[in-house]
Image (cartoon, grey):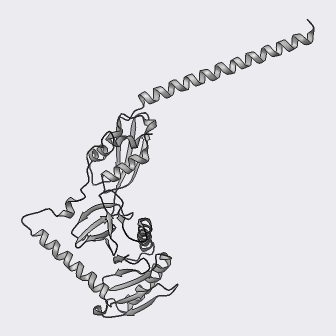
Amino acid sequence: MDRKNYDNKAALAKKRKRRRTILHSTVGILFISTVLVVLSVVFCRVAKFTVAGESPYSRDDIVNSVKACEGKSMFLIKTEKLEDLVESALPYTDNVTISKQYPRGLRIEVSTAKKAFSVELSKNCYAVTNGRLKVLEATDKLPEDTVTVKGRPISSYSAGQILSFTGKPGDDAIRDALIEIAQAIEDTALEDINMINIGDENNIYLVYDNRIIVKIGKAENLANKLSLAKKSLDEENKLSPAQYGELDVTINKKAVFAPDDLKDLPELVEFLEEQDRSENAEEETETDEAGVQTAADTVIQPDNTVPSQSDSADIIG
């Protein structure tokens, strides 16, 4: 055998050996990985819950709202679904964050939802929501420190769920407009807003300090409109802090204030009369010795029981 043939055979032998080594290594890695995955799925199952943050609900209430995931594989849990589950089951929770703590724990961090809107459902009946229009409760008593929302029919409401409107424009457009208005009010520090009327999407108006109607028209350029409104209201308050009237900021970069008597502001008169009726109804309820629970209190009470097994399918992959 000549030298050249010998070298070729030796090279081929080395290649075969290298391939076998690579193949064996790959099979070994795959085997070990499979074993680790199987062991993780078998042993890394939810068994411990840690609750953090401030909430009006007890630790047991919060844990029970996600109890359906107990015993499920940590790797298959969808934390986003669990977060939605907590906010739905416990309406007064907000900004829920759930994180996995391997090998067997879940950390649930919550905060208390703040009341933002009181959306009119019917005469002397309101759905109280947070700033994202998630329903916190229904009541016949107009809560303090909320902005009353009027003018738009409600198609459905349920504690822990986002409020649904009817009519045109659709749900999303109405919700977006309200949320944008609320954000603009906060950004401009425009305080003492009592009511938002969204009955006509082209002629939205606010009630300021129970005495001035602020016309903002369409839900566009809201930050600029409300910033302009605040400057104008501050100036008018310096001149006369008790005057009634209308402030029009529908025209771009222009605010026009027209002082007027209360009797000449029908929208404001109607709103104030409804407030009086609500306060009277609240006083009657407080003095009612029968203590009959109103329909508004019973229609959307949340079910805080542990989710069923059928519900648990949504929280795992």
Relative to 312, is 40 on the left or the right?
right
Residue 309 x %, y %: 32, 39
245 to 89, vertically: above or below: below
Q: Quadrant of the C terminus?
A: top left
Furthest toward the front, the residue is 167
Furthest toward the left, the residue is 289
Residue 170 x %, y %: 42, 67
In this figure, what is the number of numbered marks?
0
The quarter holding residue 245 reads: bottom left
Furthest toward the right, the residue is 2
101 to 85, vertically: above or below: above
The residue lying toward the viewer, choosing from 154 and 137, is 154
Residue drawn at x 60%, y 21% as measured from the top left: 28
Residue 304 x %, y %: 26, 49
Residue drawn at x 37%, y 46% as measured from the top left: 108
The quarter holding residue 60 reads: top left
Residue drawn at x 33%, y 88% as measured from the top left: 241
Residue 97 x %, y %: 41, 50
Q: Quadrant of the N terminus?
A: top right
The quarter holding residue 205 reads: bottom left
Relative to 36, is 161 on the left or the right?
left
The residue lying toward the viewer, choosing from 36 and 312, is 312
111 to 316, vertically: above or below: below
Relative to 70, is 296 on the left or the right?
left
The residue lying toward the viewer, choosing from 203 and 258, is 203
